[in-house]
Amino acid sequence: HELWFQLEDFQNEKRVAKYESFAIDNAQEKYELIVLGEYSGTAGDSFFAHRDQKFTTKDSDNDKNGVNCAVKYKGAWWYKKCCYSNLKGLYLGGEYPKSQYGEGVAWDTWRANTYFLKYLHMAISIDY
């Protein structure tokens, strides 16, 4: 399966991140991100740090941090010591102070974790 993200900021600039392969494990294994292939695109590789991570929610803390990243950053995700990308954060929009670092929909390698995106689309293509 191929995974791709389409991102857009509040200046209507669009970026893309694609991964040539993608697989997650089952519920018993906490939906661990077990395969994440080679990156290509224009957004930068903000999903790289999430490889081999289990999915964290506010009631299931599976990240490798002293705090629950899903609570701290307001959304469930494959966190590893929290934020390199957070596409399930709050919809805040635009630039915010460092005190709100990572709380919104963010892709660190493009607009950093204090700029929250207007739009995102995450898709998986299935090989038959």
Image: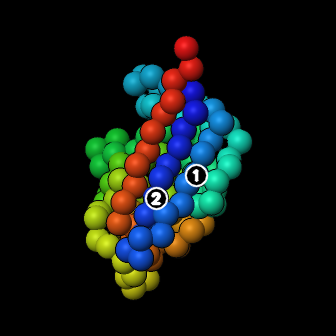
Residue at the disc numbered 1: 17
Mark 1–mark 2 Cα distance, whole angstroms, equals 8 Å
Describe the element under mark 2 as helix, strand or loop. strand
- Residue 40 in sight from this viewpoint: yes
Q: What residue type is labelled 2?
A: Leu
Q: Observer-nearest residue: 43 or 11?
A: 11
Residue 119 pos. (x, y %) = 36, 60
As displayed, is residue 128 above or below residue 17?
above
Residue 106 pos. (x, y %) = 44, 64
Q: Observer-nearest residue: 57 or 91?
A: 91
Residue at the disc numbered 2: 7
As displayed, is residue 24 above or below residue 68?
above
Total labels drawn: 2
Q: Residue at x 29, y 71 (%)?
A: 92
Q: Which amino acid does label 1 sit on?
A: Ala
Q: Quadrant of residue 38?
A: top right
Quadrant, the N terminus: top right
Describe the element under mark 1 as helix, strand or loop. strand
Q: Residue at x 40, y 55 (%)?
A: 120
Residue 108 pos. (x, y %) = 54, 67
Q: Residue at x 63, y 32 (%)?
A: 21
Report if the CB atoms under discs 1 and 2 are less than 8 Å apart.
yes
